[in-house]
């Protein structure tokens, strides 16, 4: 069946007019934000702080893993 004849494919004329009007509307330009004055040294300092925090978190996780993992001999004593 031809889509133009199929009532499921028909659109109301008001919707077609709205789509046509939107297609012809001018596109508003995005507002340009001025660049932030941030010295390069401060940005590197922040990256170093982030790296220190991540390495500290990784070390803490490794220590927690070591503490929670117990050898099988300890498990035998607990189950007795």
Image (cartoon, rainbow, N blue to C red):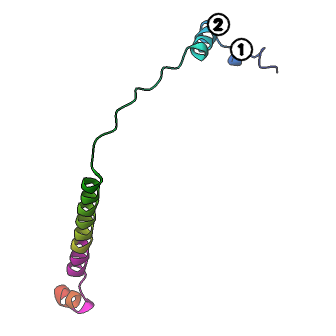
Q: Nearer the viewer, mark 1 or mark 2?
A: 2
Q: Is 33 on the left or on the right of 73, as rendered?
A: right
Distance between mark 1 and mark 2 Cα atoms: 13 Å
Q: Name the residue under label 1.
A: 7
Q: Is 47 on the left or on the right of 77, as rendered?
A: right
Q: Position of residue 53 (x, y in %)?
A: 23, 64
Which of the image's four quarters has the N terminus?
A: top right
Q: Is 60 on the left or on the right of 34, as rendered?
A: left
User: Residue 24 sits in which quadrant?
Assistant: top right
Q: How would you rate the neighbour count of disc 1 (Cα within 10 Å): few for under 14, some for 14-19, many for 20 or more? A: few
Q: Where is residue 15 in the image (x, y as percent from the top left)?
A: 60, 11
- Is 73 above or below relative to 14? below
- Say whether residue 14 is magenta: no
Which numbered marker is on residue 62? none
Q: Residue at x 22, y 87 (%)?
A: 75
Q: Nearer the viewer, residue 7 or 49?
A: 49
Q: Which residue is drawn at 20% across and 80% down?
A: 67
Q: How would you rate the neighbour count of disc 2 (Cα within 10 Å): few for under 14, some for 14-19, many for 20 or more? A: few
Q: What stretch is highlighted in magenta?
A: 61-73
Q: Which residue is drawn at 64% across and 7% down?
A: 13
- Say whether residue 71 is magenta: yes
Q: Which of 20 and 6 is in front in this view?
A: 20
Which numbered marker is on residue 13? 2
Q: Is mark 1 on a helix, strand or loop?
A: helix
Q: Position of residue 12 (x, y in %)?
A: 63, 9
Which mark sits nearer the N-terminus, 1 or 2? 1
Which residue sits furthest bottom? 73
Q: What element carries label 2?
A: helix
Q: Residue at x 23, y 85 (%)?
A: 70
User: Residue 63 sits in which quadrant?
Assistant: bottom left
Q: Main secondary structure of the magenta part?
A: helix
């Amino acid at each position: 069946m031809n889509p133009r004849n199929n009532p499921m494919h028909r659109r109301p004329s008001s919707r077609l007019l709205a789509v046509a009007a939107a297609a012809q509307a001018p596109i508003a330009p995005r507002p340009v934000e001025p660049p932030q004055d941030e010295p390069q040294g401060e940005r590197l300092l922040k990256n170093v702080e982030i790296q220190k925090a991540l390495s500290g978190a990784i070390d803490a996780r490794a220590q927690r893993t070591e503490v929670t993992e117990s050898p099988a001999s300890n498990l035998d004593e607990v189950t007795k």
